[in-house]
């Protein structure tokens, strides 16, 4: 945690579920909200489930976010969804630069930065993901890789927009493996130093999330680490009880 910073527990539902399941999951999260007062909650359903999930949440009990947006504001971009469309659909956030998009869709730091600019322009808070591969960690490059991704992916307006950075080691996503708490703390200290140097007076209190195999059983230890201001949760966010259990692990 960072003193004075309210943690954010974000659920990345990825490409899972039906409309009916999205409604039920959102309803399940809403039903347990009273027990998790210490953090802001955010759910990021697939685009076509955004509306039903937001409606099931009562529209404002929890933040709603997209999992990606286009860099362009509108026009002939078949299959894409603009940041303004997400805002119009009730979103307050958008995940950008997830490693699955960087790896599977070839997204570069420059593209992620352009998308983050578009998100900010539309009034969304970008949640920009960074993280090293296993080979990069093994060769001692992890911190340098993450610092370079932050330098390349965060636009100038990021701090004013209260942007969020999520550290997600690629090898920890969906694998059940996590870095040691010491390794997470070391990475987040480096990230804090980078963002505070880039945005003096603002970067000190921007939220830095950890993501990658977060679950109720490891959340308390991770969320108590310095400079860890919440979690980006994939698999465990698909069960309301697990997602709420992670949120309940936020230190008081
Ligand atoms: P995971 O995914 O929690 O299933 O590891 C995290 C993410 O990709 O955001």
Image (cartoon, rainbow, N blue to C red):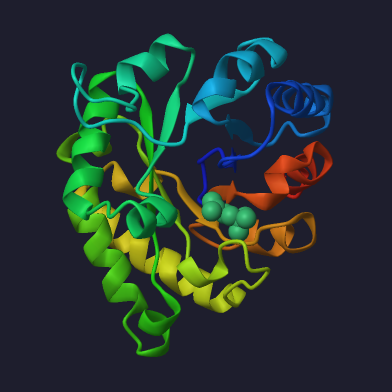
Q: Is residue 232 above or below residue 160?
A: below
Q: Quadrant of residue 192?
A: bottom left
Which residue is at the front of the view, 153 or 2? 153
Q: Is residue 92 left or right of residue 178?
A: left
Residue at the spot x=83%, y=28% of the render?
32
- Residue 170 coordinates in the image, percent (x, y): 47, 67
Residue at the spot x=73%, y=58% of the render?
220
Q: Is residue 35 left or right of residue 100?
A: right
Name the residue furthest front: 78
Q: Quadrant of residue 136?
A: bottom left
Which residue is at the front of the view, 186 or 137? 137
Q: Is residue 165 above or below residue 132?
A: above
- Residue 228 coordinates in the image, percent (x, y): 53, 56
Q: Is residue 250 visible?
A: no
Q: Quadrant of residue 92?
A: top left
The C terminus: image quadrant: top right
Q: Is residue 3 left or right of residue 237?
A: left
Residue at the spot x=58%, y=31% of the render?
45
Name the residue furthest bottom: 139
Q: Is residue 125 visible?
A: yes
- Residue 3 coordinates in the image, percent (x, y): 52, 48
Numbered disc total:
0
Q: Ligand 1, what quadrant? A: bottom right
- Residue 104 coordinates in the image, percent (x, y): 38, 56
């Amino acid at each position: 945690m960072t003193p004075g910073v309210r943690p954010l527990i974000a659920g990345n539902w990825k490409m899972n579920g039906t409309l009916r399941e999205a409604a039920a999951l959102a309803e399940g999260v809403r039903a347990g909200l009273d027990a998790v007062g210490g953090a802001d909650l955010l759910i990021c359903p697939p685009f076509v489930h955004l509306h039903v999930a937001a409606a099931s949440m009562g529209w404002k009990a929890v933040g709603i976010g997209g999992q990606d947006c286009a860099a362009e504001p509108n026009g002939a971009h078949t299959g894409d969804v603009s940041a303004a469309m997400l805002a119009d659909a009730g979103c307050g956030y958008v995940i950008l630069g997830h490693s699955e998009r960087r790896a599977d869709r070839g997204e570069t730091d420059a593209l992620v930065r352009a998308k983050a600019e578009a998100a900010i322009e539309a009034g969304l808070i970008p949640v920009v993901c960074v993280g090293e591969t296993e080979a990069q960690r093994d060769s001692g490059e992890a911190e340098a890789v993450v610092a370079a991704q932050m330098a390349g992916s965060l636009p100038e307006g990021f701090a004013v927009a209260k942007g969020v950075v999520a550290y997600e080691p690629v090898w920890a996503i969906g694998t059940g493996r996590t870095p040691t708490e010491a390794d997470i703390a070391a990475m987040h200290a480096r990230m804090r130093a980078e963002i505070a140097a880039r945005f003096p007076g603002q970067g000190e209190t921007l939220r830095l999330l950890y993501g990658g195999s977060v679950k109720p059983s490891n959340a308390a230890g991770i969320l108590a680490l310095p400079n860890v201001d919440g979690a980006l949760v994939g698999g465990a966010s698909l069960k309301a009880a697990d997602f709420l259990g992670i949120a309940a692990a936020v230190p008081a």
